[in-house]
Image (cartoon, rainbow, N blue to C red):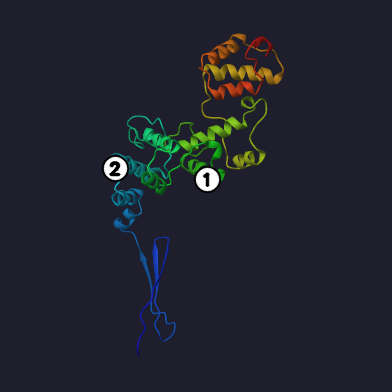
Amino acid sequence: MEHKKWWHRILTRDGLIMAAASVATGLVVTGLVVTKIRSKRAAKQDTEVTKITALVAAMALKPAFSKRLLELAAFKDRVGHCDVPLGSATGSKLVPVGLGKWVYAQRKRKADEQIKADEEAALVSLGFRWKLDPEELDVDEMLDRLAAYKVANGDTLVPKKYEADPLLGAWVAAMRRKADPLLNGGQSALPPELRQQLDQAGFSWEPARRCGSSFMTGFRTWSEAKVAGKPVPDDKWCELQREARRQGKLSEQRISYLDKFDFDWEACGAA
């Protein structure tokens, strides 16, 4: 009896390969092979470094760019994303010296339309983010990252400058700012639905350490008095903020905190 050619359907799940075969005399299952794939070679093929090494060779990227791209791939292999912090500590085990600044430079090159098409494509292949605005991040993704942090650390007290996931640290800080009435003119700017989601995730609304800068210490005292309808408690502090703004030393964020309370930039006593 003439047999037709064998055919194989390969299904991969949880590291197993299941192979089914049939012959021409009908659907006769001749075997089911279950094989564990645990070889180092297969594991190596799954790394970002291996993929980028092949990409670099295929695209003939410049050596300096390729070196940093491979460092970024290794970073992603270690922590699962490409959101490298800008100001990492020298000697960090997670981030090679200068990688954060290089990543920042690539975003600037993209914004200035100076990045080459092949370099942009290589970064995109790694899942590179071109914008890191916490306000524009996907909430479900960040809640997943927060849940992973909680599993690893037992709490949700993510540091603002969290080296392993700086984007999560920035997002957590942004959520706290939006929820704080004193930073939003006397009432929370966080949507109720998002507040509920964060509460269900066990979100820590107070950081492990509050900002102890002279501005924030004075601002909290001043804004609490404004909310309570009391007189301005510290005219000297108000004048210092006015002077800092005149000299261009007061950040836009801090100016916005004060503006939300209709801060009088001319005469603090009347504020």
Q: Position of residue 174 (x, y in %)?
A: 55, 33
Q: Which residue is mark 2?
A: 62
In this rendering, would 260 be left or right of 145?
right
Q: Amino acid at mark 1?
A: Glu
Q: Which residue is mark 1?
A: 141
Q: Is residue 105 above or below residue 228?
A: below
**Residue 198 in sight in this render:** yes
In this rendering, would 245 be left or right of 6?
right
Residue lying at the far bottom of the rendered structure:
1
Q: Count the labels in the image.
A: 2
| Residue 76 found in image quarter | top left
Indicate which disc, 1 or 2, sits on the residue closer to the N terminus.
Answer: 2
**Residue 205 in sight in this render:** no
Residue lying at the far front of the rendered structure:
113
In what quadrant of the picture does the C terminus appear?
Answer: top right
For the point 65% across and 15% down, which residue is it? 264
Q: Mark on residue 67?
A: none
Q: CA distance from mark 1 to mark 2?
A: 34 Å
Q: Position of residue 141 (x, y in %)?
A: 52, 45
